[in-house]
Image (tube, rainbow, N blue to C red):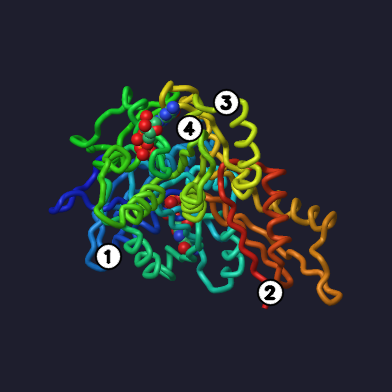
Amino acid sequence: MDNETWTDGENGPVPTVAVVGRPNVGKSTLVNRILGRRAAVVQDQPGVTRDRIAYDAEWAGKNFSLVDTGGWEPDADGIGAAIAAQAELAMRTSDVIVFVLDARVGVTAADEQAVRILHRAKKPVILVANKADSEKQEADIAELWSLGLGQPRPLSALHGRGAGDLLDDIVEAFPEEPTGSLKEEGPHRIALVGRPNVGKSSLLNKLAGSARSVVDDAAGTTVDPVDSIVTIDDEDWTLVDTAGIRKRVKFASGAEYYASLRTQAAIESAEVAIVLLDASEPLSEQDQRVISQAVEAGRALVLAFNKWDLVDEDRRYYLEKEIDRELAQVAWAPRVNISALTGRSVQKMAIAARTALEGWTQRITTGELNKWISDLQAATPHPGRSGKIPKVLFASQVGIEPPRFVLFTTGPFDKQYQRFITRRLREDFGFTGSPIDLVIKPRE
Ligand code: GDP
Ligand code: GDP
């Protein structure tokens, strides 16, 4: 079959599954196992060139296209660069990514490089620990949780052990609508939210100079018909639910309820929520509610104080006080002062959004985290409880967007100490603009 042969099913595109991993981890063996025949040529020496090939495959009545990205000759930049490029491509062109590593070898530097790329994937990534020929390897495989790619699936591609379960997982991860091949990912997604009259539609109009309507032609992008692409500070952003911002729908009753539902939906389909606040008026309960919605949805957060043209010395003084008093729980969110009317500092929103997205996707290695937590406990231990001091046994950042930490402990941790850990994480590592999810798992 030809290089880059992308298959469509009878009813349009079928999901594409890319198998990525270092040479010699068993990608071709896995592909053959899935196809149930010896279609891909398996080479015993590592690094033998093969073309990237797409095969028609089927499991549980579902057709899909299986892409073997094996045979990447590491170029001058080495195996790490090659596998990174392979991962990038898979992310852009497939619906599900199967990342294979060798359970006997463990995680290599090249694997780690690929993992860093794959963390950015908006597609499901299935982590496969191949060459787990017997149950003996299971304990080592559990360690792969710390890669932050979810549950590691043990597999023996050679003998078939775990293959059925893996295929079930792959089929389960298929999207409702396959993206089709070679589709680019769209720009980062922003939800512009806030209570009525804070200036959302004014701001949208200000940005509209650059707004490209995507209502008519969404092909090749991830944009929904109600989204717009706008350019802020020379970067494209997808503004979600533009219709909701633009339309001044007045409901006979329950208007607030619908507005709140719409806000929720917009936040959930975005990566970063920019909550607009009216700087000229006291913060309201409604403002707080919108902020909480963004935090609880686990989105990156930017606070934009609009109508700054109306803020004088006096008001600024009181606003500072209000912020200290009422927004302490989101002190980590970047703040920008803007005016939708004059266009003041609107481009700063983009800088803030980029900062927040960085915090939202930030990652600490397991080694660094455990060293940090043991230093922290040595300096400031958890308060004693009937003579015993609960301790962290092992810590791992298990996810991003937002960063999520699991602490395996000798006993329960009180809320205050958990807040202390979160605060210190921010002081020492940043995580600007992102909620932090901390999970305590006391030993039984
Ligand atoms: P890739 O081309 O890098 O994806 O890897 P291959 O499919 O060529 O496999 C590399 C080598 O690993 C071959 O000698 C395979 O027979 C061997 N191999 C693949 N899967 C397994 C497995 O599950 N268990 C064992 N023991 N060997 C395997
Ligand atoms: P929305 O309900 O959040 O979409 O708010 P609008 O965009 O409809 O704005 C509500 C009111 O605030 C309108 O009268 C706008 O002209 C006004 N407004 C919006 N932004 C600004 C601003 O930056 N400065 C001033 N002075 N007024 C603004």
The response on whether ligand 2 sits within 8 Å of label 4 is yes
Q: Residues within 10 Å of mark 1 (few under 14, many from 20)?
A: some
Q: Are marks 2 and 4 in contact (CB under 8 Å)?
A: no
Give the alpha-carbon distance from disc 3 to disc 4, as whole Å: 13 Å
* Disc on the earlier residue, 2 or 3: 3
Three-letter residue code for mark 1: Trp
Give the alpha-carbon distance from disc 1 to disc 2, as whole Å: 40 Å
Apparent side of residue 121 relative to residue 444 in the rendered image (left or right) = left
The response on whether ligand 2 sits within 8 Å of label 3 is no
Quadrant position of the N terminus in the picture: top left
Q: Residue at x 69, y 60 (%)?
A: 418
Q: Residues within 10 Å of mark 3 (few under 14, many from 20)?
A: few
Q: Residue 415 location, x and y as percent?
A: 68, 64
* Disc on the earlier residue, 2 or 4: 4
Provide the residue designation for mark 4: 306
Mark 1 residue element: strand
Q: Residue 121 location, x and y as percent?
A: 43, 46
Residue 289 visible in rendering:
yes
- Give the total of numbered labels: 4
* Disc on the earlier residue, 1 or 4: 1
| Comparing labels 3 and 1, the label whose residue is closer to the camera | 3
Mark 3 residue element: loop
Quadrant position of the C terminus in the picture: bottom right
Give the alpha-carbon distance from disc 3 to disc 1, as whole Å: 66 Å
Provide the residue designation for mark 3: 312
Q: Is residue 242 above or below residue 36?
A: above
Three-letter residue code for mark 4: Asn
